[in-house]
Image (cartoon, grey):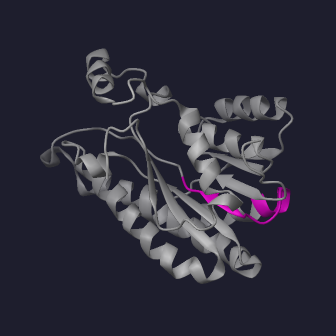
Amino acid sequence: MAYDHAGRVALVTGSSTGLGKAMAFALGRSGARVAFNYAHNAERAAQTLAEYEGEGLVGCMLQADVTSEEGVGALVEEVSSQLGPIDVLVPNATGAQPQMPIEDYGWGFYQEMVDFFVKSPYLLARAVLPHMKQRRWGRIVNIGSEVYDRGVPNFSAYVAAKGAQRGWTRSMAMELAPWSITVNMVSPGWIPVERHAQDAQADKDAYLAQIPLGRWGVPDDIGAAADFLASQEAGFITGQTLVVNGGLTVS
């Protein structure tokens, strides 16, 4: 195990596939009891949980709309019932991410992005903080994106919401530091997962050519970053953004 999360309970939203799945598996392999979450695809979720439990890891899979106050409340209650109170929170759930000119977006889509990347982390944090404050220990690992640093065009709704989430991360880190609760962000580059199956090969080739390390990132790279920020060893790091993109952006 890279880190020792024995005795900890982690919740990773949007974790039946993609980067969320990799982060949940990484935390489980380090000893955490992990609650997975999905929104719609029950069959895929069941397959993911079977794969996870096949490694002898402890966890559960729960359906919830994590942009809903009622959904978040029920989810956190069920995690606590099945695994125990939540020590590590990774708000990862996301919706569709179309790129288009600003004139083609409606405010409804902007609101959807805000709901996923500001409202959902807020609702989840509010629900788990009483336990974390009582124990004077907790980890919140938000998931950002390099698109904020790169100012990717035709992606304004997603970029704006991710920027808001980064600001929220910084403020919450300062607010929660007195309780030894850290709040950080993992900011991935373009790491092809299931949602990118139909992306144009020319776009992929052009992106890969820019990466200084000369290779694609893989989901386990993000899993390792989240695993570290959730660890005891990362206890003196808070309010920071760890960009995982092979050096494509340098701050």
Left/right of residue 219 with respect to residue 115 in the rendered view: right
The foreground one among 224 and 80 is 224
The foreground one among 25 and 103 is 25
Measuring from the top left, give residue 57's x and y in whole percent.
83, 39
In the displayed image of the protein, which residue is found farthest to the top?
A: 201
Which corner quadrant of the image does residue 49 belong to? top right
Region rendered in magenta: 79-91
Residue 123 visible in the current orientation: yes
Left/right of residue 31 with respect to residue 68 in the rendered view: right
Measuring from the top left, give residue 149's x and y in whole percent.
28, 51
Measuring from the top left, give residue 129's x and y in whole percent.
65, 75
Measuring from the top left, give residue 156's x and y in whole percent.
23, 50
In the displayed image of the protein, which residue is found farthest to the left?
A: 103
- Asked if residue 208 is positioned above or below residue 64 in the image, the reply reads above
Which corner quadrant of the image does residue 22 belong to? top right
How many callouts does the rendering have?
0
Q: Is residue 90 magenta?
A: yes
Image quadrant occupied by the N terminus? top right
Residue beneath the point at 25% across and 38% down: 99
Residue beneath the point at 84% across and 44% down: 58
- Asked if residue 141 is positioned above or below residue 62 in the image, the reply reads below
Left/right of residue 171 with respect to residue 31 in the rendered view: left
Residue 64 visible in the current orientation: no
The foreground one among 181 and 78 is 181
Left/right of residue 194 with respect to residue 87 in the rendered view: left
Residue beneath the point at 71% across and 72% down: 137
Q: Is residue 235 magenta?
A: no
The foreground one among 75 and 217 is 217
